[in-house]
Image (cartoon, grey):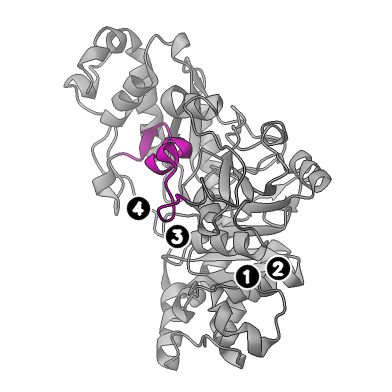
Amino acid sequence: MSQLAIFGGAPVRSTPFPAYSVIGEDEKRAVMEVMDSGVLSRYLGCWDEDFYGGSKVREFEAAWAAQSQAKHAVAVNSCTSGLYAAVGALNIGPGDEVIVSPFTMVASATAALIFNAVPVFADIDPELYTLSAETIAQCITPRTKAIIVVHIFGQAADMDPIMALARRHGIAVIEDCAQVPFATYKGRPVGTLGDIGVFSLNYHKHIHTGEGGVCVTNSDELADRLQLIRNHAEAVVEDKGTTNLVNMIGFNFRLGEIEAAIGLSQLHKGPALIAQRKQNVQYLETKLAGIPGLAMPKVGPAGDHVYYQHVFDYDEEKTGVSRDSFSAAVKAELPPTLLREHEGPLLGAGYVKPIYLLPMYQRMIGYGTVQCPFRCPLYDGKPSYDAGICPNAERAHQSRVITHEMIRPQMTTRDLDDVAAAFHKVADNFGELSDRAHTIA
């Protein structure tokens, strides 16, 4: 056995992995067409023909709606903005509760806070890392107005039971689809299963425009409200003739013409990029088979996985080595990825700290001196953000989950062989790693 790099041995590989770069000549041409037109944006924050933006934005929205099999698509400047707009469009406000996942990027919960609603955290399924109908049901109260279901790591939550539960209680459903573009659930496009789906076009997603997002819905009313919140609603509603003024306090969530043009080019590339991810995962999982304590990601009832990240469930009881020590040893064997060199090897122990453990929730301080929405006079609930309320999420982050991104397109089979070799090398040295774990920072 060769000595582990974390203890001074030679690493499996030192040459950086190839960059994940999906911007090419098509995008360059699309950008130059916009530049040559002289129209970088065409929005007006009043009721006008240009209230809906320029020609590229509208073309991009139509193309995204067609790809998603949705009646409407509304482009925004980020998935975060889209989530905010979605909560607002559903008439959610002070005194209301929104059930959210604790195991995701903070924006999913912050979207409720923006409209002075209270996030209530439901635990995750320990194998899919998504909310489930069972965990959601435990959190429903008369104040529950919506559920934000986060489809995470590349596959959807089990949506049929969730939707049945939501409809039974008259609760709206928002799908956070940031990590699942082009994914399906039992053959149906993700994002169209609930009331509103929100996608991300951030630079490290499957396809991207640098920054950006898209909301999809089959509701004419919700699409109209999303468009109003996106573009200065309060200045528009009178001339437009809008009568439902709830949450018609607008923002500037507008996507520009350049980003929309890039999005059109990226949209055509998506299926091939997803296919390459799936192929890479299949190849790597074959190479990793048999490593003790390392379980490959489960594909759940959705029947589809687009692998935003490749996520292992690690069982230290089977190895005698902690998850953190194992991950650190694997990282020491591998190089960073070009364009993201400062991040080191794209492999992590855990994912995100459960959101409710962040200072804002622990101290329940939000807006103003009355600490809305947590202690808002209009709210008669008693939210709990104590450690232990979502044991599956805490366990996943603290000791079980290992994430990595080294399955992206541009990774060759030779690159994947090196990734597999690093895992096997560490597994072959479990004994030494266990004996010297105290020396790993």
Of pointers 1 and 4, the one earlier in the residue sequence: 4
> As shown in the figure, which amino acid type bears the numbered disc 4?
Ala
Secondary structure of residue under mark 1: helix
Mark 4 and mark 3: span between their CA atoms? 16 Å
Mark 1 and mark 4: span between their CA atoms? 35 Å
Residue 125 inside the magenta-drawn segment: no
Q: Residues within 10 Å of mark 4 (few under 14, many from 20)?
A: some
Q: Nearer the viewer, mark 1 or mark 4?
A: 1
In x, y percent, where is residue 97? 63, 47
Residue 356 inside the magenta-drawn segment: yes
CB within 8 Å, label 1 to label 4? no
In x, y percent, where is residue 223? 68, 71
User: Residue 19: which numbered mark, if any?
Assistant: 4
Q: Is residue 387 above or below residue 174?
A: above
Q: Which of the 4 image quadrants contains residue 415?
A: top left
Seen at 79% across and 50% down, the residue is 170
Q: Which residue is mark 1?
A: 226
